[in-house]
Image (cartoon, coloured by chain):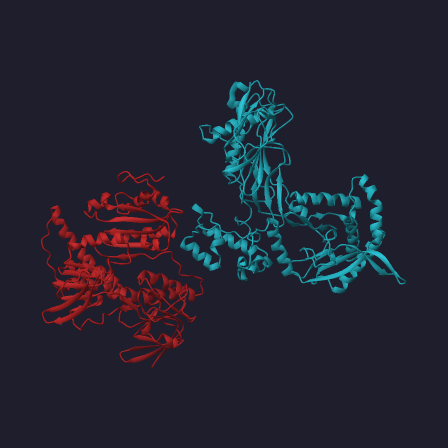
Amino acid sequence: MSNLHAQVVVLGSGPGGYNAAFRAADLGMDVILIEKYASLGGVCLNVGCIPSKALLHTAKVIDEAEEMSAHGVDFGKPKLDIDKIRDYKDGVIKQLTGGLAGMAKGRKVKTVQGYGKFTGANEIEVEHDGKKQKVTFDHAIIAAGSRVVDLPFLPEDDRIVDSTGALELRDIPKHMLVIGGGIIGLEMATVYRALGAKITVVEMADQLIPAADKDVVKVLEKFIKGKYENILMETSVTKVEAKKDGLYVTFEGKNAPEKPQKFDMILSAVGRRPNGDLIDADKAGVEVTERGFINTDKQMRTNVPHIYAIGDIVGQPMLAHKATAESHVAAEVIAGKKHYFDPLTIPSVAYTDPEVSWVGLTEKEAKEQGIDYGVGKFPWAASGRAIGVDRKEGFTKLLFDKKNNRVIGGAIVGVNAGELIAEVGLAIEMGCDAEDIGLTIHAHPTLSESVTFAAEVYEGVCTDLPPQRKKK
Amino acid sequence: MANLTEVKVPDIGDASGVDVIEVLVSVGDEISVDDGLIVLETDKATMEVPASDAGVVKSIEVKVGDKVSEGDLIVKIEASESSNDDASDSDSESTEDSSADDSSENGDSQPSSAEESTEDKGEQKSSKPKSSGGSRSEPITIPDIGDSEGVEVIEVSVKAGDEVEQDDSLIVLETEKATMEVPSPFAGTVESMSVKVGDKVSQGDQIGTMKVTDDAGDDSSEDDPKEQASEPKAEKETSVKDQPMPKSEYKPAPVTVEPFERSEGDVIHASPAVRRLAREFGADLSKVKGSGRKNRIMKEDVQSYIKFELSRPKATANSGAGAPADLPEIDFSKFGEIEEKSLSRIQKISSVTLQRNWNLIPHVTQHDEADITELDEFRKSMKEEAAKEGVRLTPLAFIMKALVASLKAFPTFNSSLAADGETLILKKYFNIGVAVDTPDGLVVPVIRDVDKKSVYELATELGEMSEKARDKKLTAKDMQGSSMTISSLGGIGGTSFTPIVNWPDVAILGLSRNQVKPVWNGKDFEPRMMLPMSLSYDHRVIDGAVAARFTVHLSKMLADIRRTIL
């Protein structure tokens, strides 16, 4: 058993882990990055954000080509080569993870493949192919991420997959059930529908993407309603029977079909849980909560001062961009900088069609916090650009604190909503008020204009809409 | 011809809907400028609204019980033809003021010079026997305010258009020691004020401009009223642009005196990079005033806040008002009825300095008694004679003389400890600070060169200083440079107390009420008038034995005041 030592050891090479390792290396520390898989990048790059976006791009082009038939351009029915689609997706992953490996090398970050577990306060044992290796460290950054939540009643069956399995794109089922109307389930539903599957979504809550505001999700719901076979709200799955000819699913709840329904494939996407329980953190003295999270202070330090934790494992929201921001803080704090993780907001995006994005407070949250807020909402039906691309179902909504007219939140639904939300995040971080946003000239005709217009609506000075009730 | 002038409620602070509690004039009254018209009562104080014009009251538009706000009409005044320049000047002003209210085309909405009015009114007034002399625009600058730099403006007492007399208060400043008024260097009309409450000023800073009327007629304005009128305008523009930048690094209220605090609901905004910078230096953003758009906190604000904090004397940083914060808050109302009363400004200031001095200086208090029987007899015998010269002969004037004699004999008492704590600065001057109790709190004016002044002079000056203190007219300079301080409670009572050394002094002499006591003279008890003295001193500088010798010496001086001239 060989021994390795580094000033900083990072456990996990997802967006949190590799960024922490790279930042630490850039700050002059010697770094070891431990990853259980052969390629770097974690869930995000290998079985998450990136492959799903590659497939969503494919789906988008298929959908748009179909939409064009109504505008006089008929491409005909697409011929799908599932292997090639998969290859494209895998190529994207390869390119990115290969890039990471190169960047690690360039920074002299040593990567150690294997499953790492703590064996002491300054020691991790990495196991790979039955071989064990000890890695000692001065500082550790735990970036071990999260895993899919399993539904205990689902039988073992090839046709029942989680998001990782769905991204493998083995084949296109005729009838597909998506359990969970959250971001992951709906994104995969978008892909599989475009590739030809008939989709049923079942969700326990009374709205899809429960974290977002109802009016925003309503637009998505309305848009997909006719396209999906079924959307079963306030309903849950109680039993799945795997038979040769299909998976027979029994539902319960408000919209439950009376008889068990037959599906060819089931995607279980009911959430993710942190991996705090899988790394023997207690052997290093690091406390793990009952649910598997590791608590940190605002400098990402755990209860053990030289051990840090970042990303999904430290709490919600489980988003790559949050992990990345935290990773820099952790590495910089280790390097002696007095940095803190204190963003005002972290954006969320569902890359569905249409996309749904939000940042800052939702109306729900603003109400809960008792904030006297005002809404500026610009419907895309009045946007020349949205009409031009024949996607006028969306809207841009900004929330302002009535006390000082500062923007406190925003939500966008529509094509490219995920890109458009960035500006609202910047506005919140910079403390913009409605006037600042309204007076910032946006290019015409763009969808981004809708952000300006929403601010103007709040101010009562928007002239791109029918006359408003006077505000001032 | 006669002009009807409307007199309106002037700027009365934030108050609106203020009760009229008295009307001081009646129709037909002839009034002069600054005569009281009505009395208003706000929740803070009652105030008289003075007449801005002279003339005859034609109508009164308010009555007792009315609620008024800034700009409300109070009276109409007819300025008689015979009225002097002053009256017509202010007459035209107020006319213009009223037009300025609705931000008319009158581009220059802040007139105030007689010339402008003349111009505006055309021939109507050209025949007026204008100006026995010309008038000129003078910058108003901050006079010598002692060593203080970057002193905060806590009140602006005048506004453009106000007529002021020389020495009228223009603005009120607050130093670490006290508040002081900046008197007008001229008599005339305020053209513009370029400072506002919260600004910081230092000696030489321009705070505004004033139109001063000269007696000499050499630059008579009759020929070129236009030029005259445009001149102050130009100046006004530049005075806006060149608003004196406060010299102090850090703009907000000095944290030493009154920590800058945001009112509730005030939103702090700092962008992510600014938040990071603040974190790095441990700067509490809630204490940083934002200079950016919409009060956003900029990097520069954090930097100057940090500089400011670093430049603060360490003693105040880790003592002072900080301590009470550690104490738990107690809800006294659960024990019975209570009332909350905020400390006066001076009390707040002195609480910080007293706390600092108490923490900084290792205090020892030496108690002694001086036999002042003869001194008192002599003083009483001279009282009448002194009174004839207009002097109120108090024991304190004699005690100061005696104290100077003792300071000469014990030079370490007339010293300060240098900041390095290793050097003693011995003073060759003899300035005695005298603690004066005012309704607002304790202040310590300093009587200079006590060694060179007669007892009469000292007694007179003591009277003047006390009056100045009570009228809040003391300047920072009046309260600086003491050799030692006397705190006398003799007029009230008590047998001894432990005064706190008034840093940078190294000693303070506390005096309690003198008493006739039986004193053993070797044969029998004699009734003697004894003055209890409590000498607190900085033990780092003065040893106990020296302090005891000092009080013995001082007792000797007081026992026979003739010794002081030896």
The residue shown at (62%, 58%) is B356
Of the pair B111 and B157, the residue shown nearer to us: B157
User: Which residue of the protein is positioned furthest toward the right in this rendering?
Assistant: B523
Q: Colour of chain A?
A: red
For the N terminus of chain A, the quadrant is: bottom left
Of the pair A196 and B349, the residue shown nearer to us: B349
Location of residue B562 in the rendering, given as x and y in whole percent from the top left corner: 85, 51
Q: Colour of chain B?
A: cyan
The residue shown at (46%, 28%) is B106
Left or right position of B293 against B517: left
- Camera sees residue B566: no
User: Which residue of the protein is positioned furthest toward the front in this rendering?
Assistant: B336
Left or right position of B491 against B240: right
Of the pair B121 and B81, the residue shown nearer to us: B81
Of the pair B146 and B317, the residue shown nearer to us: B317
Number of marks drawn:
0
Left or right position of A400 against B59: left
Locate residue B325: give its quadrant: bottom right
Location of residue B321 in the rendering, given as x and y in whole percent from the top left corner: 57, 57
For the C terminus of chain A, the quadrant is: top left
- Camera sees residue A58: yes
Location of residue B71 in the rendering, given as x and y in whole percent from the top left corner: 50, 33
Note whether A288 is above or below B54 in the view shown: below
Location of residue B435 in the rendering, given as x and y in whole percent from the top left corner: 69, 51
Left or right position of B303 against B85: left
